[in-house]
Image (cartoon, rainbow, N blue to C red):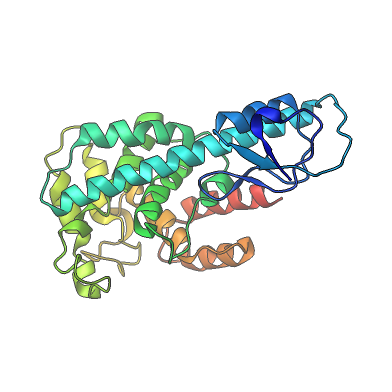
Amino acid sequence: MEVDVDRLTPGMILEKDVLGKSGNPIVEKHTKLTETHIEFIKHFLFDKVSVAPFVHHSVDKITATEKQQIAVNQDNQLFTNTFEKAVQHYKKLFSSWQNSVPINMYLVRKFFVPLFDEASELNIDKIISLLPTSNTKDYFYKRTVLMSLLSVYLAKKLNFKKKDWLQIGLASILSDSGIAKLKGLSKSKNIPEETMRLHPIYSYRMVENEPTLTQHAKIAILQHHEYLDGSGYPANTSGKKVIVYARIINVCDLFLSVYSNNHKEIISVLEDYKHNKLDPIIVQQLVSELCRDSE
């Protein structure tokens, strides 16, 4: 039965999941409510929730484990909400680039640097849980933002200093900005491959005179689709000429392209690529993080 949130009392048991805006449960069904749960539900401005009827609800003291789980759930939902807002910011920026508005680094940093700080402290499963399916609304924008978060996360795990992983994150979020300049983008979703292969060049040109980006970040934007064996684009750059910033973004880009819920499957793909196309040290770090979180 549905109950006004103001009438909730500790001990009541949820009959249905309480879903956040992203569609993920913020409090799962069958949860016995505590004062903390109730405050959490009210925080998200719900009017009613479903609780099990005809049950005598006793008040139990919340355990330390339950408190910890509630805090984790709350943090996760807050981050998901922040992520969704960042996606909408990116969408608006991308639209402005399509209309020939120059990249505004003040806004880019304002919208995404705080998100990078948060992502650097998360576990990898939380980050990749945000990956939408290819038919999801705003898929391109969500995937781009997610790639930047994963790049930041991986760079930090590789012991890069904050000033470096922030630049890697900025390079990643701007790496596909040049797609906004491709002819026919607004008319068709199926851009010819030879045209799409030009977007790193356009992305680079959009930032090449930007003083707040380091030269390494700018080159990473240009090289983010280059492979170590020279089979990438736009310049078939190979080996040590592909800078490490670009290698990190490249690994994250491939990971998101072939990701599945089966960690063994994705690890197998990464292992195949690391022998000639991807940096083996970066791949191994990502594989280690995936294995650690799946234990």
Q: Does residue 149 appear in the picture of this structure? A: yes
Q: Residue at x 37, y 41 (%)?
A: 86
Residue 214's spot in the image, x, y percent?
Answer: 23, 36
In the rendered image, which quarter is residue 163 located in?
A: top left
Q: Is residue 229 left or right of residue 75?
A: left
Relative to 145, is 251 above or below?
below
Residue 73's spot in the image, x, y percent?
Answer: 63, 37
Q: Residue at x 31, y 70 (%)?
A: 231
Relative to 167, is 231 above or below?
below
Residue 25's spot in the image, x, y percent?
Answer: 63, 46
Q: Is residue 124 left or right of residue 86?
A: right
Q: Residue at x 37, y 46 (%)?
A: 87
Q: Is residue 36 left or right of residue 203?
A: right
Q: Is residue 111 left or right of residue 96?
A: right
Relative to 204, is 68 above or below?
above
Q: Does residue 156 appear in the picture of this structure? A: no
In the rendered image, which quarter is residue 11 located in?
A: top right
Q: Residue at x 63, y 39 (%)?
A: 48
